[in-house]
Image (cartoon, rainbow, N blue to C red):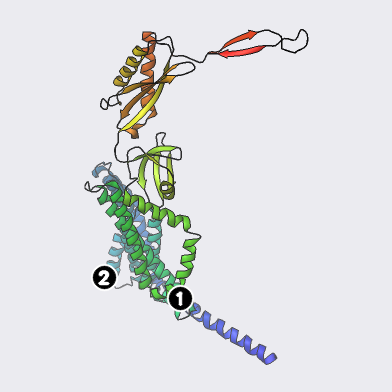
Amino acid sequence: MEETLKSAEEKIIEDVSTGLQPVLQYFVDIYQTMALQFGSWSALIQLGIIAVAGLLAVLLARPLRSLCARVWPESTRSVSIRLREMVDKLIFPALWVLFLWISTAALRGIGEGNDVVRIAASLLNAWILIRLFTTVVADPFWSRVFATAAWFVAALSVLRLLNPTITLLDSVALTIGDTRVSIYLLLKGGVIAAILLWIAAGASNVLQTRLKSTRRLTPSVQVLIGQLAKFTFLFVAIVIALNTVGIDLTALAIFSGAVGVGIGFGLQKIVSNLISGIILLMDRSIKPGDVIEVGGTYGRVTSLGARYASVLTRDGTEHLIPNEELIIGRVVNWSHSNPNVRQKVPVGISYKSDIELAKQLVLEACAETDRILKYPEPNCLLRGFGDSSVDFEARYWINDPSEGIANVASEMLFRIWHKFQEHGIEIPFPQRDLHLRSGSLAGGGEGEDKEEAELAA
C-alpha cells in the first residue's frame, strides 16, 4: 500500500514538473533576451539617448501643433475633425521616432551598438501604424482594445519574444476526444472571429446605407435586404473563423439536438419575433414611415428590426414593440394603402339654436382649417336628439396622419367656438329641474308625507 502511494506521489510530481517546464523555459528566454539587450553600458547610453530624443520631441510638438491649427482649415465635417485630432496625437511620436532613427544611423556610423535604440524606434513605428489603422474603427472601446492587443504583439515580435509566448500558450491545452484545445487556439480564434465580425458588420452597414439611397426600392424591401445581408455576413464570418482555427464543423452536429431544444423552450419568443419581423418585411403590412396605433400607442414607425419595431410618438417617446405583437395583435395602420384618413368630431347645440345656421358654421370651420382636405369635402351630419343637445357630427379628411390627429380636431373646434359665439349659437350643458310634491301614502299612518323627486331635462 505504501509503495502504491509513493509511486502515485512520484507520478504527480513528474506531471507537475513536465507541465511547468514550458513556463520555466519561457521566463528563462525572457531573462536571456533582456540581459542580452539591456545588460551593458552601451544599453544604458542608448536609454539616455532615447530619453533625450523624447524630450526634444516634447519641446517641438507644441509649436508644431500650433502651426497645424493655423494652417488646417476649420471644418464641421466629422471626417475632417477626426483626421485633425489624429494628426495632433501623432505629432509627438512621429518626432520621437524621427530622432531615434537619426540616432540609430549616427551610432552605426561611429561603430557603436544601436540595438536598444532600434528596438525603441521599431516599437514607436508599430504604435504609429496601429494608431493610423484604428482611426477607421468608430467605437472608441474596440479601437483601444485592438490598439493595445496589436501593440503588445508587435512589442513581443520586436523583442524576439513572440515565439516563446506562443509556445507557452500552446502548451496549456485540453484534449476533448480527438480535438486539442489550447489557450493559444482560443485566443487566435477569438481574434480572427472579432476581426471577421467587425468586417461583416461594416460591410452590412455600408450596404444598408447604399440601399437607403436607392429610390427604386420601397422601405420594407430595403430593410429586408439589409437584414438578410447582415445575417448572411455574420454567418459566413463565424464559419470562416471556425475553419481558420481548425475546428471541424461536422463535430458541431452533436449539439444540434440541444440547440433545437433551446430554440423550442428558451428561445421561443426570440425566434417568434425574428420570424414575425421577416413576415412583416415580406408582406409589407407595416413598413418604416407608416403611422400605426397598437395597444394604445400611436406614432410613426421609424425602423423595423429583427426583434422589434421602433414607434416614435408625438410626444417624442420611442416605443420598442416586439414584432410578434404586430402579427398576432390588432393594429390600426393609418397609412397602409392610402394616407387619407377621415375623422369624426361630435358637436352639440342647444334646442333653441338654429340648426341650419349651426351646420353652415361647422362646415365653414372645417374649410378654414389648414390641414383639412377640400376634397373629399367636409360634411356635417345630424346624428340625433340628445338629453341636452341636438347632436351633430363633423366629418372631414386629412392626408398627413403622421403630423397628428388631435391637433386638427382642436384647431377646428376652436374655430367652431368662435363662430358660435359670434352668431349666438348656444352650446348646451346638462341641466336638471327638481320638482317636489307633497302627499299622503295610500294605507300609511296619519300625518305621514311622501316626497317624490322628479328629474326633468
Which badge, 1 or 2, comes first in the chain's sequence? 2
> In the rendered structure, are the residues bearing label 1 and label 2 in contact, judged by CB atoms less than 8 Å apart?
no
What's the mark number on residue 102? none
Residue nearest the observer in this picture, 272 or 446: 446
The mark found on residue 109 in the picture is: 2
Examine the image and state in which quarter residue 126 appears: bottom left
* Residue at left offset 46%, top offset 18%: 386
Residue 94 visible from this viewpoint? no
Name the image quarter holding residue 169.
Answer: bottom left
* Placement of 345 over or under 119, stated as above or below: above
How far across and how far down the image is residue 109, in percent?
Answer: 26, 70
* Secondary structure at numbered mark 2: helix
Q: Residue furthest left?
A: 216
Task: Give coordinates of residue 285: x percent, y percent.
Answer: 34, 46
Q: How many discs appear?
A: 2
Quadrant of image for the N terminus: bottom right
Q: Does residue 363 appear left or right of residue 438 in this picture?
A: left
SS assignment at label 1: strand
Query: Can residue 446 be seen from the camera position used here?
Result: yes
Q: Amino acid at mark 2?
A: Gly
Q: Residues within 10 Å of mark 2 (few under 14, many from 20)?
A: few
Other-residue count near label 1 (Cα within 10 Å), few / some / many at <14 / 14–19 / ≥20: some
Q: Position of residue 329 (x, y in %)?
A: 44, 45
Q: Which of labels 1 and 2 is toward the front?
A: 1
Q: Position of residue 401 (x, y in %)?
A: 34, 33
Label 1 is placed on what type of residue? Answer: Val
Mark 1, residue position? 181
- How far is disc 1 from disc 2 in space, using C-alphas? 50 Å
